[in-house]
Image (tube, helix red, strand yellow):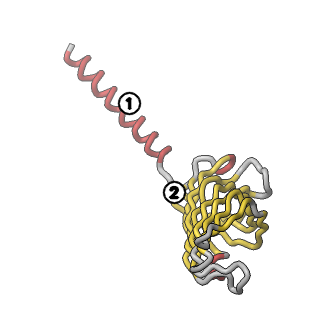
């Protein structure tokens, strides 16, 4: 009787260990370098108004950005479609934006890519000046869908206008 109980216990322990190993292998994620190189943009402005204090509010802008997304050794053409909410202090040039974004791989409307939020700040922003800003700080966290389901893309930029066009970070695959 004791042998049967001991045998059953050992068998159960072996099953638990094998299942744990399999689950651990399935859960293991890989962190891979990622880079987004912006090559162009098109912005359709939404509702814009300025308060008496010089604070400009922009709601429902729909910027679209074009570029290349590099994850590890793989490169993908992307179209990033956003809806944004922006506040600009016209006196100081301090700009804060929140963008609900879909990063389509290949072409707009494709079944694969990443979606989430992009948050940015720009300093000394002057849309009519060149360069239009002195510093941009942008962060995004995007979740994969389609061929990228289960992956997380985290990118950022902190720099001047030239840095604005290359975002760096990683992808958790």
Q: Nearer the viewer, residue 78 or 139?
A: 139
The residue pinned by badge 1 equals 15
The residue pinned by badge 2 equals 30
Classify mark 2: helix, strand or loop.
loop
Question: Residue 95: x, y in percent?
Answer: 59, 72
Specify the farthest residue to the front: 52
Q: Residue at x 58, y 47 (%)?
A: 150
Q: How would you rate the neighbour count of disc 2 (Cα within 10 Å): few for under 14, some for 14-19, many for 20 or more?
A: few
Question: Residue 164: x, y in percent?
Answer: 64, 76
- Quadrant where the image shows the N terminus: top left
Question: Residue 117: x, y in percent?
Answer: 60, 57
Residue 46: numbered disc:
none
Specify the farthest residue to the top: 1
Q: Which of 142 and 160 is in front in this view?
A: 160
On screen, residue 83 versus residue 117, left or right, reads right
Q: In this view, does 13 lie above or below 169?
A: above
On screen, residue 167 versus residue 3, left or right, reads right
């Amino acid at each position: 009787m004791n042998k049967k109980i001991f045998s059953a216990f050992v068998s159960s322990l072996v099953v638990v260990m094998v299942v744990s190993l399999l689950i651990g292998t399935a859960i293991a994620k890989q962190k891979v370098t990622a880079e987004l190189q912006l090559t162009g943009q098109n912005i359709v402005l939404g509702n814009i108004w300025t308060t008496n204090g010089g604070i400009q509010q922009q709601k429902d802008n729909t910027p679209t950005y074009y570029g290349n997304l590099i994850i590890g050794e793989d490169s993908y053409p992307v179209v990033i479609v956003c809806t944004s909410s922006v506040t600009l202090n016209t006196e100081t040039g301090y700009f804060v934006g929140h963008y609900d974004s879909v990063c389509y791989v290949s072409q707009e409307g494709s079944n694969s890519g990443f979606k989430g939020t992009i948050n940015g700040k720009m300093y000394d922003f002057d849309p009519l000046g060149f360069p239009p800003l002195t510093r941009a700080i942008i962060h995004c966290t995007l979740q994969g869908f389609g061929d990228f389901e289960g992956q997380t893309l985290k990118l950022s930029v902190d720099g001047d206008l030239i840095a604005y066009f290359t975002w760096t970070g990683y992808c958790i695959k």
